[in-house]
Amino acid sequence: MQLTGDGTVARAAVTAGGCPAVMADGQPLPMALRRQADGLFPTVCQRLIPPGVHSLSVGGQALPTPTRAPQRIVMLGDSGCRIQGLTVQSCNDPKAWPFAEVARLAAAQKPDLVIHVGDYYYRENPCPLLNRACAGSPHGDNWATWQAEFFRPAAPLLAAAPWVFVRGNHEVCYRGGEGWYAFLDASAQLQPCSGWTTPFVVDIGGLNLYVLDSSNTIDRGAPPWNVAKFSAELDAIGPKLEQGKGWILTHRPIWGFVPVARVPPLNPAELSINVNEQAAVRGRALAGVQMIVSGHIHDFQSLSFGPDRPAQLVVGTGGDVGEPADIPRIRQGPRSIDDMAADFFTFDRFGYLLLERQGEDWAGAFHDAQDRVVARCRLHERALRCVRA
């Protein structure tokens, strides 16, 4: 179940037979074909669900029903297991790749909504011969890999609540793009793979989620054509970014720090990103945006700038390997990025963030892969304050 700009959509992968019906309050709603089965993927079916439905199922499998104003939101991203070039993650070791456990623990929190900030697909190359850490792993943009990377480990969390899916740079066309468009892209009809998907808005009870595609923006450069692409996405959302109330969801953070080198016992040296997106938002007040929610950097970060800029949250903590220079120790203090001072808070742990609506604020905690609370956060207007638990 996923939230899109058109409403709530049920999707199903069908390995035998035609598209089934969604049972909605006991009444059958036929699903439409989204993608025909081929040598890479099964048949994919979908159905837009009318509002006000209390029970849903497909093929006897219960589906989570949407909540008009979600009170509990789980956030995570960058969840796949990396087999790419010289980097081989131990996909068969649940401690080295804990996404299944993170999803199980997050599902136990009974969220009303899950936000995944992108990067589902990492198994781009075969597991090296005689490497037990990933032996038997599928690879390539196909159904077996998407099952192993996402659908099987995420199953408890997929059953717990509807999701909002953000496209990551691992879902670009030359990587996991076909699977992204088949299963997760929010467009009503299957689109040919493209570098940029259409932005959309989801209203979750007085709070707008502005979902933007930054999968092809550039972290450390700002060529005019690429800046124009991201600017066009902001323009497509229109006046709501200035007059509404909401969060931007986009994979690459507009503001963030990547740990690039470390000499123990010192903290890592860091480089800032994303120059491209910073150029696109420069000169925009974004007065209707409280916070940017992203992944891409494989750790947890919060940057709070005060009333003149939306806060930035990074939750690239779902399961993929982090930067070699990163450390689990909490680091915090003042930073300057894109010509503005920020209160910065960060650490490198696998896990998920659970935020709960508290009046006009959102507050909650980051849980690690053992479900220990590492940090507590509160968003008040544009101020995002995270502290050690």
Image: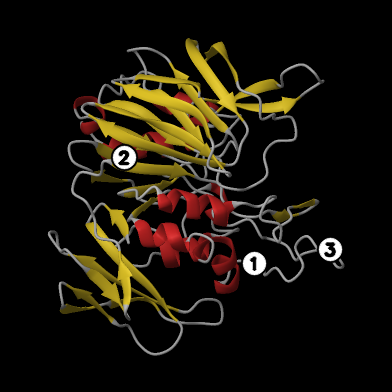
Q: Could you say which disc has been placed on residue 210 in the image? A: 2
* Amino acid residing under circle 3: Asn
Residue 78 in percent (x, y) is at 56, 46
Q: Of label 1 and label 2, which has the lower sequence position?
A: 1
Residue at 56% x, 53% y is 101
Taking 316 as reference, is 387 above or below it? above
Within 10 Å of disc 2 (Cα), the crowding (few <14, some 14-19, many 20+) is many
Q: Secondary structure at mark 3?
A: loop
Residue linked to disc 1:
140
Query: Mark 3 and 2 residues: CB-CB less than 8 Å, in contact?
Result: no
Q: What residue type is disc 1 on? A: Gly
Q: Residues within 10 Å of mark 3 (few under 14, many from 20)?
A: few
Residue 267 is left or right of residue 64, and the answer is right
Residue at 66% of width from left, 55% of height from top? 94
Quadrant assignment, res 4: bottom left
As shown in the figure, which amino acid type bears the numbered disc 2? Tyr
For residue 338, say whether it is visible: no
Q: Please indicate whether residue 199 sits to the left or right of residue 107 in the image.
A: left
Instruction: Say how the picture is coloured.
Output: secondary structure
